[in-house]
Image: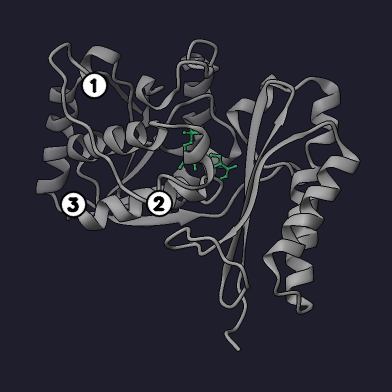
Amino acid sequence: MLIIKDIKSLRKVLDKASRQEQKIGFVPTMGYFHEGHLSLMRQAKKECDLCVVSIYVNPKQFGPREDLKKYPRNLKRDVSMIDKENVDILFVPSDNVVYPKSYLTYIDVEKITATLCGRFRPGHFKGVATVVAKLLNMVRPDIMYLGQKDAQQVAVLKQMVTDLNFPVTVRVVPTAREKDGLAMSSRNVYLTAQERLEAPVLYQALQMAAKRIKQGERSSFQIVRSITNSITQQSQGKIQYVECVDPNNLEPLKTIKGTVLIALAVFFGKTRLIDNVIVPIKKT
Ligand code: AMP
């Protein structure tokens, strides 16, 4: 595996690969890998000739009171974790490579960034869209792999790719979970033992809601209420939001008619966890 830190060296290797018509798969990450990240890399290896993974903890997607400084970082650990995954290139740019002092350009995807997490994390998706646009221009992949865990990020980046004509296919990989259902996240290391014990309630509540929808419940209000009740009765989790939305445009659904995305964000202590499920139902 090549570890590359600058754009010139990255382009040298990737230009050669492109000349040889190799298909390039790209997995953008903030590092501190878990099985979720690895599942994206495995999918990229399956479908592409070359797998490029980036690690960059993007300061522009963290709010002033968020966890940028203490976000877990450990390159040695990450390198040893992906050694067996046949990743071809690990791209690890530093802040001055991504945002030189003269930097002035931002990408603002409108509307769908104002709902769900965007309501509580102003500027977050502007930071995400900007860094991913930059990384796409650096790597120029054929396919970019994203996790369903971050459903709003998927919607925002798909919109950006379409709107700005990025020549890339977006592939979405299912959420990897711990045995007890907790969605894997680099932030899970922040949880105390008690919080970790309680956190699986999020997925349990989402699954129960999915079951109710499959049994015929069509009221978003009832679905949100049942999820909220489960979480507050079974844990100390403080709910930021629970919403039923259209998975493509993220518009709230009063009545569940087609496929629904149920998304939530809940604080366990200082740790903010997100999770979601997509429930497909046939239109009636
Ligand atoms: P992050 O390092 O958290 O920015 O995540 C990098 C990529 O991995 C994003 O596309 C995430 O959606 C994806 N990802 C994070 N957690 C999971 C998970 N549990 N399952 C699948 N993909 C994930």
User: Which image quarter: residue 196?
Assistant: top right
Residue at the outermost bottom position? 284
Residue on which the image places disc 2: 112
Mark 3: secondary structure: loop
Q: Nearer the viewer, residue 94 or 67?
A: 67
Mark 2: secondary structure: loop
Give whichever of discs 2 and 3 has the lower sequence position: 2
Give whichever of discs 1 and 3 has the lower sequence position: 1
Determine the CA span between mark 2 and mark 1.
25 Å
Residue on which the image places disc 1: 98
Q: Nearer the viewer, residue 269 or 23?
A: 269
Left or right of 51? Residue 72 is: right
Residue at the outermost right position? 233
State the image coordinates of residue 130 (x, y, percent, origin top left). Answer: 27, 34
Mark whose residue sits in front, 2 or 3: 2
Camera sees residue 25: yes
State the image coordinates of residue 249 (x, y, percent, origin top left). Answer: 42, 61
